[in-house]
Amino acid sequence: MAADVASLPRPRRPAAFIDRDGVINAELGYVWRTEDFHLLPGAVDGLRRLAGCGYALVVVTNQAGIAKGLYDEAAYQRLTAHMRGLLAAQGVVLDGVYHCPHHPQGTVAAYARECDCRKPAPGLLRQAARELGLDLARSVLVGDKTSDTQAGRAAGLRRTVLVESGHALPADALAQADHRCADLAAAARWLCAGRGENGA
């Protein structure tokens, strides 16, 4: 009897998990106003290349400013919609955007706590994998802090890359990532070199 194709499980996709501030947009402290959101050179090209290699594009971002009362969830969602719109206008569609609003030293009681979603914990990546049907073992991460690469390794990702956004990195930063490069475009070139431009 022929298999019912519709009933067969779909293969899980690999994802490129991308940190936001310092990787996609300029790092200006707490970015929550649309006028402060500026795409970095190479960000769009990098995202396009990663999508062309077959990766789902998933942004994962710590947003401690919510816990600290600097802005609220509504302001964060407005900026996220703005980011999606800017990228979509250049042909880049994000498969998901996940954020952690918590911080142990927060001043907003609802968010002032330890959690499993604030990087370096892997909770955001695992949540995205459940909700989007992602294969973590074939996925990659690009960030600008070791908390990003630590989250990727804790989630069991295939590769993690650090980009140089100007954040001071510890002496052992390279030991906590598989590669280090200037920006998202360079990270995408390196990741896709071992994967092929067509998702192979």
Image (spheres, rainbow, N blue to C red):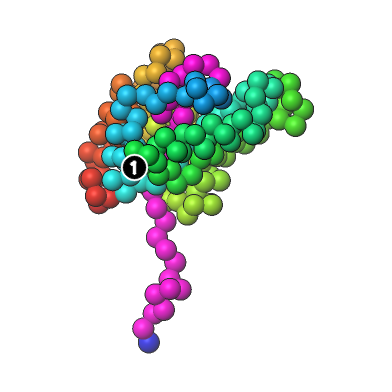
* Residue 170 left/right relative to 72: left
Amino acid type, residue under disc 1 in the picture? Gly
Please name whichever residue, 76 or 65, is drawn nearer the observer in this view of the structure: 76
Pinpoint residue 99: horizontal percent, then vertical percent: 57, 35
Instruction: Look at the image and say whether residue 23 sits in the magenta stretch.
Output: yes
Q: Nearer the viewer, residue 167 or 22?
A: 22
Give the quarter of the image for residue 93.
Answer: top left
Residue 98 falls in image quadrant:
top right
Regarding residue 104, the answer to whether it shows in the image is: no
User: Image height check: is 30 above or below 134?
Assistant: above
Q: Which residue is mark 1?
A: 91
Using the image, determine if residue 53 lies above or below residue 110.
Answer: below
- Residue 110 horizontal side relative to residue 168, left or right: right
Residue stretch in magenta: 2-30
In this rendering, does residue 21 appear at all? yes
Residue at the spot 58% in from the left edge and 28% down from the top edge: 63
Residue drawn at (30%, 27%), measured in percent from left and top? 42
Residue extending farthest right: 109
The quadrant where residue 51 appears:
top left
x, y percent for residue 56: 39, 47
Q: Residue at x 54, y 52 (%)?
A: 131
Give coordinates of residue 38: x percent, y percent. Answer: 42, 23
Q: Residue 83, percent across and down?
A: 46, 34
Q: Which class describes the residues within 10 Å of circle 1: few (<14), some (14-19), or many (20+)?
A: few
> Quick check: 111 left or right of 44?
right
Give the secondary structure at mark 1: loop
Q: Quadrant of the N terminus?
A: bottom left
Magenta-highlighted stretch: main secondary structure? Answer: loop
